[in-house]
Image (spheres, coloured by chain):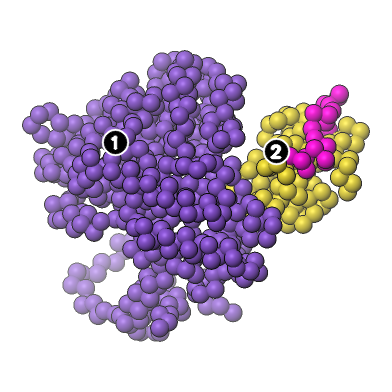
Amino acid sequence: MDLKKLRFAPTHEWALMEGDTCTVGITQFAVEQLTDVVYIELPDVGDNVFAGDSFGEIESVKAVSDLYSPVNGEVIAINTALVNDPTPVSKDPYGKGWMIKIKAEPGSKLDKMMTQEQYEKQISSGG
Amino acid sequence: MPSNQSTDLLFELSQPERRCHLLPESDVPVKDKLLPAGAVADAPPPLPEVGEIDLIRHFVNLSARNMSIDTNFYPLGSCTMKYNPKRHERMAALGGMANLHPLQSDASCQGMLRMLFEMQTILAEIAGLDAVSLQPAAGAQGELTALLVAAASFRDKGEKRTRVLIPDSAHGTNPASAAIAGFDAVTVKSNARGFVDLDDLKAKLDERTAVFMITNPNTLGLFDAQITDITRMLHDKGGLVYLDGANMNAILGITRPGDFGADMMHYNVHKTFTGPHGAGGPGSGPIAVRSFLAPFLPAPVVTHDGNSYRLDYDRPKTIGRVRSFFGNVGILLRGYCYIRTLGARGLREVSEIAVLNANYLLALVKNICEVPHGDRCMHEFVASARTLKRTRKISAMDIGKRLLDFGYHAPTVYFPLVVPEAIMVEPTETESKETLDAFARALQGIVGEEADFLHNAPHTLGISRPDDVKAAKEPVLRWKGPKG
């Protein structure tokens, strides 16, 4: 995965927009902060999600955290493999650890999100 | 000397026909068909069969592996692991207290009812609030009860309020309680100094807000001096302020939640006023509220008419019971003994020394490990292994685990969530300067050790690092018969 194509949220999700399909996961930094991931709760295909609202939860041995959607839209796919075994999120957060694909509302843009460079600056200045 | 004899599971120690006790033959005639056929087992259950000496060694040796405030310094932040005076155990064991039956008539347990009534009065006074329910079994149930009381009050007024605002540094129980009480939990950010971000609060505060839950001093061990502004903001919008009383040990007799504008709060009697706690219980989480919320408190409450004490169930607006009988009375009794022993001046001194001890330890620790939120604290402080993690791969978890080798219970780690690699230390007032000095020396030694060595700590205990993920995902909650 070319991280330059991704956009990042302050809440440590990444998003990739291809046409009107937005793929969402969490960042390497988030994975390191969470340590061992125990469970992931994802929405159902067909659910509506809203930018800035929680679409699911990730539970590690340290904490339960909300997962936030970057766009408004409808869930068109979820990574069902993660529900039984969340290991790919820890091992390959930008690849096999993707979480959901959203059919974004027309006109949705990620331009308010951070670039890789901006995101790295945020995490090095205190997360 | 290793004390591991007979510490296998009792099922594994079992030998057929081995017995601790010989029971006499039943002298009650055995009657057939007392139970329906489907309820009778075909064979007796496979209970373990062991001799008394094995049984005693089993439990005594296992108990010796336990770490408690009676064996070790226990600076578990947020948990107030202070020494529990043994005198309270003698008081709680007095026949007139320990042998009461909860269904006795009020007239036959006036002493107990007087103790509970006085406890209600005392807790109201310390809170600066008007009315108390002793029922909640621990802090989180106190939160839930208070939110149900708030909801009942809004319902009574015909107001529809759906949201509870909670700072991001809060205990995880706060949003959980809000959700269970039927509210939407909304997070309010902290500012760079660790206090409530007033702009964020302002942005999220409106007529939908029922309650703002705040822990003050907060979980970073800092007193949020904006509190009167915060309570005014809430009251201006018709909302209520709930104080999470987990950190009352810092402010006893110095300030009162009611005086700084809180409308409701809970106590953790087991923490602040000593009940032997840890490892799951028992707790006691009374709540105190302003008078306009009193009609909604759980029933019964203890009342006094000048002559006698009684349990008052006649409370038409009550939210109902939240706990069987009258709460965890044994812990309330210990707390009562503690409060009456110390008196008002003594309680204030508890907080003064708790704060002094924490600041003394903070002054030692900040030379070893960074403490992101300032040079001063209340009764606890939060250090961070963030730089150690980045530069040497030593985590808060590694330090906590290694402290066990030195005979110290680990501090709370990875909480609050607003501090990366958090190490939360609460020494309490009952520890001596020598203990605090020795703890700081151990910490100093640990951060000088090799990272690889620390990753595998503890090195001296029977169990090193359990597999947390497997335990969470595939918990083994009961014995499933012999292995293999």
Front tag of 1 and 2: 1
- Cα gap from disc 1 to disc 2, whole angstroms: 40 Å
Nearest the eye: B241 or B153? B241
Residue B44 falls within the magenta-colored stretch:
no
Q: Position of residue B290 (x, y in %)?
A: 33, 24
Q: Which chain is purple?
A: B
Residue under numbered circle 1 = B253
Q: Secondary structure at mark 1?
A: loop
Give me the residue at 40% from left, 83% from top: B1
Dividing the picture into quarters, in which one does residue A42 lie? top right
Check the image and report above or below for B307 versus B434: above
Give me the residue at 24% from left, 69% from top: B30
Q: Is residue B133 left or right of residue B468?
A: left
Nearest the eye: B402 or A63? B402
Residue under numbered circle 2 = A11
Q: Which residue is outermost to the left?
A: B307
Q: Which chain is yellow?
A: A
Nearest the eye: B391 or B20? B391
- The chain containing the residue under callout 1 comes to B
**Residue B215 seen:** yes
Q: Is residue B417 left or right of residue A22?
A: left
Check the image and report above or below for B189 versus B482: above
Give me the residue at 40% from left, 80% from top: B3
**Residue B317 seen:** no
Magenta residues span A99-122
Q: Position of residue B232 (x, y in %)?
A: 45, 19
Q: Is residue B181 left or right of residue B448?
A: left
Q: Secondary structure at mark 2?
A: loop
